[in-house]
Amino acid sequence: MAENLLGANMEIDRRAFFAGLGGVAAVAAMADEAKAEALEHHMMLQLNVANTAKFPTAAEVEAEIETRPTRRGTGNLFVSHVGNVKKLPPLPERPTLVDFYKLRFMATSNHCLQSANRAVQNGMSEEIVLACLLHDTVQDLIKVDHGWWGAQMYEPYVSEKVSFAIRYHQALRFYEDNEHGYEYPDLYRRMFGSDYKPEPYIEATYQMVRKHKWYLEPRMVTVNDLYAFDPKVNPTLDQFIDIIGRNFKQPKEGLGFDNSPVAHMWRSIARPDAPL
């Protein structure tokens, strides 16, 4: 199946691609969404090497908008970068966070698991580890302003610090903090343009959070975030089950059916094929 991911519009060194992800067996074990993301990342790297300018400008990124069939802010569950979308497995009658992680967060789970694993290795608190585990999962619903969307979706079920960390990691990721070990990632120079300037609301949010007593919570999410696949690290959700149990308030009715203010967000992730 991995062979089918390799498109015809660009010459791909299959051996290098598979080797970078840990070999053919490792690629075969990856979810389709993770394979597509890995291929997209590999192709972007190749394009950067081929271009005389390593990173595009913000204007060049904007000029690409009308070259795509979908908008970049669309959630992962609602599009396919390789062929048609696939039928999703059904969720249990009373789905838990673990169920969503395994059956709906396929495109973001590897990245979030690696970030949470890194947080554990760096001795972070359980709240920071949980924030890392959850911080990008909402991108399967929507990508634009995912910090705010993600914090809203998790707010009824996690501590105030965890939701604060999830909400504001989005703004802090655009600003270096050498004191705490955060450098601006090259990934953003590719995604947004080498001369990109954050929107005024992002700048204002950063200035507010920089002075907040909980500044280090979202900052540690950015520090432990990983912006590329690491084929040598393969954490599993089982490593974090106890942390989830101690820090996530699972509704007995199941996520999406507890009449919380965000239940509709969970139902949207559960049923992305519903026409209305």
Image: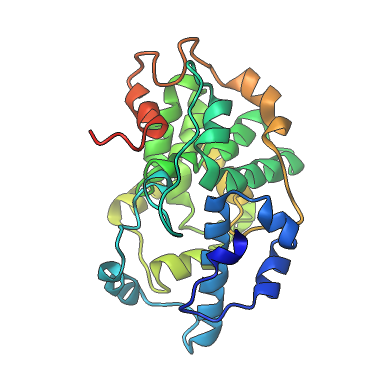
Side of 149 relative to 105 (left or right):
left
Name above or below for residue 197 compared with residue 267. Answer: below
Q: Position of residue 203 (x, y in %)?
A: 35, 53
Looking at the rendering, in which quadrant would you find the N terminus? Answer: bottom right
Side of 13 relative to 55 (left or right):
right
Q: Is residue 208 visible?
A: no
Describe the colour scheme in one phrase.
rainbow
Q: Residue furthest top?
A: 252
Q: Quadrant of residue 227?
A: bottom right
Name above or below for residue 194 compared with residue 72. Answer: below
Q: Position of residue 5 (x, y in %)?
A: 54, 64
Q: Residue furthest bottom?
A: 52
Q: Position of residue 28 (x, y in %)?
A: 67, 55
Side of 34 relative to 15 (left or right):
left
Q: Residue furthest left?
A: 276
Q: Is residue 110 visible?
A: yes
Name above or below for residue 126 compared with residue 145. Answer: above
Q: Nearer the viewer, residue 83 or 69?
A: 83
- Residue at horizontal 58%, vertical 40%? 132
Q: Position of residue 163 (x, y in %)?
A: 47, 31
Q: Nearer the viewer, residue 186 or 17?
A: 17
Q: Nearer the viewer, residue 157 or 271?
A: 271
Looking at the rendering, in which quadrant would you find the C terminus? Answer: top left
Q: Quadrant of residue 61?
A: bottom left
Side of 211 relative to 68 (left or right):
right
- Residue at horizontal 74%, vertical 63%? 23
How many numbered dots are placed on residues in this image?
0
